[in-house]
Amino acid sequence: MKTVADYVRTIPDFPEPGIMFRDVTTVLQDPDGFKLAIDEMQKALEGLDFDVIAGTESRGFIFGTPLAYNLHKPFVLVRKKGKLPAETVEMEYDLEYGSAVIEMHKDSIQPGQKVVLVDDLIATGGTMEAAAKLVEKLGGEVVKMLFLMELEGLEGRKKLAKYDVASVVSYPGK
């Protein structure tokens, strides 16, 4: 029986020497791989009490929306600055070289709602930490952070230590 890791293509030395790039496109291009990925992520949510699934741009949308659909939950977009049409709240966070800003609609999370944040990959944890701060700024509570893949060597879990973090596939190194 195949695992999600069997569907992930690894490309050595991309984008620079020494990096093992974990390519999620091969999971998405295979109907069995994509179904397995969603099924495994959904298993990680079994028994969890939550109200909303929020996904970060853009692969968090790909994995979060089928989960929201399957579980009959609303889906909230966490987008790059300037992409949402209504009134927003924003959060700036640091990147390796510079910074970025993400936004959510001001009315997307109601005070007291329990939120699951979804993305394809946990690396350094910066984007997801910023997304959690946005949820909290709106009065929501992050009850889980869910990723398809994790790069353990980048220690994103340390940055997200105060949250319940789960990943389907973990890779050592970067």
Image (cartoon, rainbow, N blue to C red):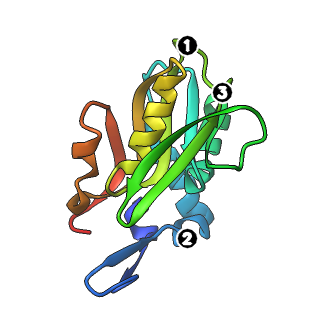
Residue at x 43% of width, y 27% of height: 142
Lateral position of residue 108 relative to residue 169, left or right: right
Crowd class of label 2 (few under 14; some 14 to 19; many from 20; radius 10 Å): few
Can you identify the residue that label 3 sits on?
Answer: 106
**Residue found at x 50% / y 67%:** 24
Describe the element under mark 2 as helix, strand or loop: helix
Residue 125 screen position, x and y as percent? 35, 49
* SS category of the residue bearing label 3: loop
Q: Earlier in the sequence, mark 1 or mark 3?
A: 3
Camera-side residue: 16 or 62?
16
Image quarter for residue 138? top right
Q: Nearer the viewer, residue 85 or 9?
A: 85
First in residue order: circle 2 vs circle 1: 2
Of circles 2 and 1, the one toward us is: 1
Q: CA distance from mark 2 to mark 1?
A: 36 Å
The image position of residue 58, as x and y in percent, is 60, 56
Q: Is residue 37 above or below residue 31?
A: above
Residue 143 in which image quadrant = top left
Q: Residue at x 61, y 30 (%)?
A: 71
- The label shown at residue 111 is 1
Please identify the quadrant where the C terminus is shown.
Answer: bottom left
Rendered view: 68 above or below 100 = above
| Residue 11 picture quarter | bottom left
Which disc, if any, is residue 25?
A: 2
> Is residue 142 toward the left or the right of residue 106 in the image?
left
Q: Where is residue 56 shown, x and y percent of the image?
A: 55, 47
Tell me if residue 59 comes above or below residue 41 in the rendering: below
The disc placed on residue 53 is none
